[in-house]
Amino acid sequence: MTVKKQFPLNLNIQFFAAETNLTRDLGAALSIDFSERFGQRFKSLYELLGIQRIQPMASGTILKTYTSSVTLDGTAVAPGDIIPLSKVVMEDGPTQELTWDKKRKAVPMEDIQKYGFERAITMTDDKLIGEVQKGVRSKLLAQLATGTGVAEGDGLQAAMAQNWAAVTAKFEEDDVQVISFMNPFDVADYLGQANITTQTAFGMTYVENFLNNKVVFLHGDVPKGTIYSTADGNLIAAYALMSGGEIAKTFDFTTDETGIVGVTHDINKQRLQAETITAYGIVLFAERLDGVVVGSTTVTPEV
């Protein structure tokens, strides 16, 4: 008979409960941070623009613009006579389609080691937010450039006054506030001599209550010597709703309370990189192109 020797077990094994306050689901936290930051920046922009119509729509919706004219019959109508018709003409302008914009960026393992996971992702997310803003802003400025209203003035103040007058004349029955966009070089000398505070929103410098305008945005995408002006009520924000529905459920998108942008963070182990993926459909546009005035500044040479 073989006898097995028994050895006392003294492995000093200790079991500890998981620590409290562990940082978990950091990807979800970063996604919330991304969507909240973009949502707040977009909200600041449309509040400055005075946009009242912020409309969620299905992706693929065709956004229509138009021009209008009214011809009133000035005939004095005798008692009992038929009232002649006045003519209202609504002509379609260029259309835009509300489509998805999708962006992805990745941070490699080396940068995560160098800067730390949270810092590396946050730094590059800031750059991605800037690119998203740029796309929305560029579309708006490109559409404003197609406005059919025209004005001209000798110098900055005269040109701004002519734009203001042209816009208010187009919307004379409405209580409008004028919004303008111009190149910063056109106003640099004026700002240097005036006690005016500039601020920044959505990647654009702006000045409030400037030369009869509610707000004037300054950006290099506006050609020098050109001013785009319109009424605040003429601007619309259309967006494809990201929150809820099959898309958010399928791709685990995080959104803010507006549902304007969806974002998710993921780990690509094959490439050893952390990725940020975002999708959105946003169009800022002017509904009436005849209500957009494209003004120009001229400078009369001194004799």
Image (tube, rainbow, N blue to C red):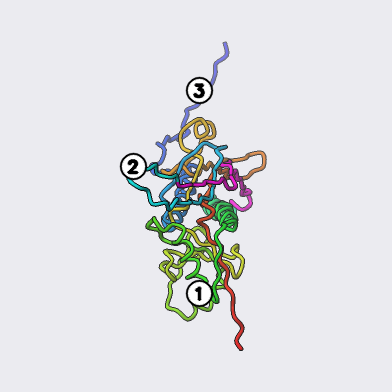
Residue reaching furthest bottom?
A: 303
Q: Earlier in the sequence, mark 3 or mark 1?
A: 3
**Residue at figure coordinates x 57%, y 37% from the top left:** 60
Quarter holding the C terminus is: bottom right
User: Which of the pair 226/163 is nearer the observer?
Assistant: 163
Other-residue count near label 2 (Cα within 10 Å), few / some / many at <14 / 14–19 / ≥20: few
* Three-letter code, disc 3: Gln
Q: Which residues are magenta?
A: 86-112
State the separation of the CA atoms marked 3 and 1: 103 Å
Q: Is residue 274 positioned above or below 58 on the image?
A: below
- Front position among marks 2 and 3: 2
**Residue at figure coordinates x 52%, y 58% from the top left:** 292
- Can residue 23 be seen by looking at this rendering? no
Picture coordinates of residue 267, whole percent (x, y) = 59, 41
User: Which of the pair 263/266 is nearer the observer?
Assistant: 263
Residue behind mark 3:
6
- Front position among marks 3 and 1: 1
Residue reaching furthest left?
A: 79
Q: Quadrant of residue 174?
A: bottom left
Q: Is residue 118 left or right of residue 223?
A: left
Q: Is residue 252 positioned above or below 274 on the image?
A: above
Disc 3 secondary structure class? loop
Picture coordinates of residue 298, whole percent (x, y) = 59, 75
Residue behind mark 2:
80
- Can residue 148 be seen by looking at this rendering? yes
Q: Which mark is residue 158?
A: 1
Picture coordinates of residue 40, whole percent (x, y) = 44, 52
**Residue at figure coordinates x 42%, y 64% from the top left:** 214
On whether residue 108 falls in the magenta region, the answer is yes
On whether residue 23 falls in the magenta region, the answer is no
* Three-letter code, disc 2: Gly
